[in-house]
Image (cartoon, rainbow, N blue to C red):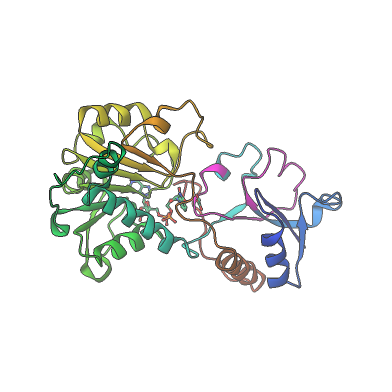
């Protein structure tokens, strides 16, 4: 029984961590010459951005562990076998990073740092800053999953009124976050979101959700933070909303094409801040520990946590 490993960008550190954490398992490096010497023995794979032919010879594959929270790239992989179980990371140290990222964007909006930065470029002593009280700065988080709920709670602890929106009804953690769900809860949720954070998974239901129709339901001058996926956002609609003043700015971490092409208008836009898909990175110790615990659970005949529903796409 072997586990095939491919994580794009790994310099060997993550592979080594898996081998140390699971000394009784044969963990095969996809990049080694003998990787597919006995494909019939490979029952599991650990992946991030596997190449197109990765699954071709894996006739005995049963589980695929995503070295990521999102699985959209994996579900779209042309060779992914129909019957395998997909297991993803749940938080694994990412929610703290994500909360910091969202808080940074919230403060950027609340303290009008974009305007002050522009004034600095003109050496202008600009004291025309309107006070935005924390209590009047509503933050809405799209998605109340492993990351969204933690982000919402941590921002609420800073005194902001925070709402969260999910597919199904969920209880409020500690009563600090106002909960909304489904289509019928969306308009009210958006109306109170001066800052909107997208932490939805990319599925057929959420693709393009950050569009003109949604922006129009936000308070005028709202600020968008998107660390979800690039295909959640309609790029043209964002530019139009910024031009009209319906949105005052955006902090974007993910893009339809990554790396973001040098000619893309987002790069030069004065009201857009770009980060290169680094809002929350997979931490080796936490991620390896979570996947290893799931592998051991399956060895014992137990159910792993973080199993992805192919039907819902997350
Ligand atoms: P998760 O635990 O699966 O949570 C997903 C949440 O979205 C759930 O609350 C779910 O509702 C909700 N949802 C799904 N489809 C919906 C729909 N059609 N309408 C309304 N709500 C919907 O996911 P997660 O672990 O929090 O991760 C979220 C995403 O963050 C990932 O998929 C990935 O794209 C992104 N991410 C980005 C980075 C980065 O560095 N930029 C890092 C990690 C993750 P229910 O609660 O009702 O199921
Ligand atoms: C990163 O984007 C992830 O989904 O973990």
Residue under the image location 30 percent in, 60 percent down = 152
Q: Nearer the viewer, residue 59 or 262?
A: 262
Q: Which of the 4 quarters of the picture holds residue 203?
A: top left
Q: Position of residue 135 (x, y in %)?
A: 14, 59
- Asked if residue 300 lies left or right of residue 163, the reply is right
On whether residue 69 falls in the magenta region, the answer is: yes
Visible residue check, residue 225:
yes
Total tally of numbered discs in the picture: 0
Assign the N terminus to one quadrant of the image.
Answer: bottom right
Q: Position of residue 91 (x, y in %)?
A: 46, 62
Visible residue check, residue 166:
no
On whether residue 5 falls in the magenta region, the answer is: no
Q: Nearer the viewer, residue 147 or 207?
A: 147
Q: Position of residue 50 (x, y in %)?
A: 66, 45
Q: Nearer the viewer, residue 278 or 51?
A: 278
Image vertical order of residue 307 relative to residue 202, above or below:
below
- Asked if residue 90 lies left or right of residue 122, the reply is right
Q: Which of the 4 quarters of the picture holds residue 177?
A: bottom left
Q: Position of residue 17 (x, y in %)?
A: 68, 67
Query: Is most of the magenta stretch helix, strand or loop?
Result: loop
- Asked if residue 12 lies left or right of residue 196, the reply is right
Residue under the image location 17 percent in, 58 percent down = 134
Residue range in magenta is 47-73
Image vertical order of residue 2 relative to residue 279, above or below:
below
Q: Which of the 4 quarters of the picture holds residue 299?
A: bottom right
Residue under the image location 18 percent in, 59 percent down = 161
- Asked if residue 201 lies left or right of residue 293, the reply is left
């Amino acid at each position: 029984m072997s586990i095939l490993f491919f994580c794009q960008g790994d310099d060997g550190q993550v592979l080594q961590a898996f081998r140390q954490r699971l000394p009784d398992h044969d963990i095969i490096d996809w990049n080694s010459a003998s990787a597919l010497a006995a494909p019939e023995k490979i029952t599991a794979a650990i992946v991030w951005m596997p190449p197109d032919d990765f699954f071709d010879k894996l006739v005995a594959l049963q589980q695929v562990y995503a070295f990521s929270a999102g699985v959209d790239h994996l579900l779209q992989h042309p060779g992914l076998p129909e019957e395998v179980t997909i297991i993803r990371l749940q938080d694994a140290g990412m929610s703290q990073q994500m909360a910091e990222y969202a808080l940074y964007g919230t403060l950027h909006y609340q303290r009008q740092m974009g305007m002050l930065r522009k004034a600095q470029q003109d050496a202008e002593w600009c004291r025309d800053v309107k006070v935005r009280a924390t209590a009047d700065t509503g933050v809405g988080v799209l998605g109340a999953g492993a990351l969204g709920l933690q982000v919402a709670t941590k921002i609420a602890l800073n005194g902001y009124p925070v709402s969260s929106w999910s597919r199904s009804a969920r209880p409020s953690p500690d009563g600090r976050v106002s909960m909304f769900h489904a289509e019928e809860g969306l308009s009210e949720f958006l109306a109170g979101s001066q800052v909107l954070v997208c932490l939805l998974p990319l599925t057929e239901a959420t693709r393009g959700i950050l569009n003109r129709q949604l922006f129009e339901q936000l308070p005028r001058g709202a600020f968008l933070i998107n660390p979800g996926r690039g295909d959640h956002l309609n790029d043209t609609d964002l530019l139009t909303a910024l031009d009209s003043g319906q949105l005052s700015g955006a902090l974007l971490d993910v893009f339809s094409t990554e790396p973001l092409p040098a000619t893309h208008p987002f790069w030069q836009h004065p009201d857009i801040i770009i980060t290169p898909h680094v809002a929350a990175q997979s931490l080796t110790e936490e991620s390896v520990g979570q996947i290893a615990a799931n592998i051991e659970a399956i060895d014992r005949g137990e159910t792993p946590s973080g199993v992805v529903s192919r039907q819902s796409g997350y």
